[in-house]
Image: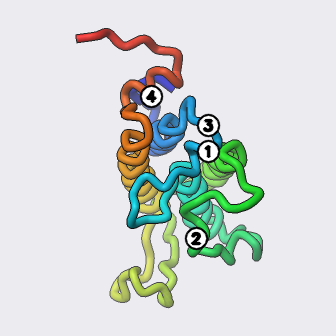
Amino acid sequence: MPLNVPPVADERDGLLQYLAQQRASLRSTVFGLTEEQARIKAIATSDLTLGGLIKHAARCERGWVAGMVANQLTDEQANRDWTTEFALQEGETLADALALLDEVERETEEIIAGIPDLSRPVAIPQDVPWFPKDVKFWSVRWVLLHLIEEQARHGGHADLLREAIDGRTYYDLLAASQGITLPSY
């Protein structure tokens, strides 16, 4: 994917393209890292690592789309251990986290392609403390916009973590991951 989203055909294509662009941006933050670097806790007050952030972003998207929109989560997927989600655990690799992100991207595109109307209501779980109590439904459109926001927020965190590891930043990394040579100014 280039540095900008290509022209879009319609609303659904636009939402999915922008979501894919945010995922590509997040993915680029680990471009060229070693397994050890993907596990660095670059902020002393946090357990957050780049590999863990990729894993978390994928699990969040799966929770929203496969879970809330399509009601298709397995028990294992639904019972996430939030305390271990922001770092790669024993037996988990950066490659695993990136493969999960790819898998979730395919799931999202498949699920959204099967929904004829993006205005379709998505029930808001009333037992989640950070969800509004005065709203009963979001739309599939709202969920996709929220996921774009979430991926962008995670990408921002990842930018800071990567810069703390080796000084590299978003445009350089995204271009390098796409084989694009940026002009020097």
Whole-percent x and y of residue 173? 44, 28
The foreground one among 167 and 108 is 167
> What SS does tag 4 mark?
helix
- How packed mark 4 is, by other alpha carbons closer than 10 Å (few <14, some 14-19, many 20 or more), is many
Q: Are marks 3 and 1 in contact (CB under 8 Å)?
A: yes
* Amino acid at pointer 1: Glu
Q: Specify whether 16 is left or right of 81.
A: left
The foreground one among 60 and 106 is 60
Q: CA distance from mark 3 to mark 1?
A: 5 Å
> What SS does tag 2 mark?
helix
Identify the mark nearer the N-term, 3 or 4.
3
Q: Specify whether 164 is left or right of 120.
A: left
Whole-percent x and y of residue 183? 32, 9
* Amino acid at pointer 3: Thr
Q: Which residue is mark 4?
A: 173
* Amino acid at pointer 4: Leu
Q: Number of labelled discs?
A: 4
Q: Which residue is mark 3?
A: 34
- How packed mark 2 is, by other alpha carbons closer than 10 Å (few <14, some 14-19, many 20 or more), is some
Q: Which residue is mark 2?
A: 68
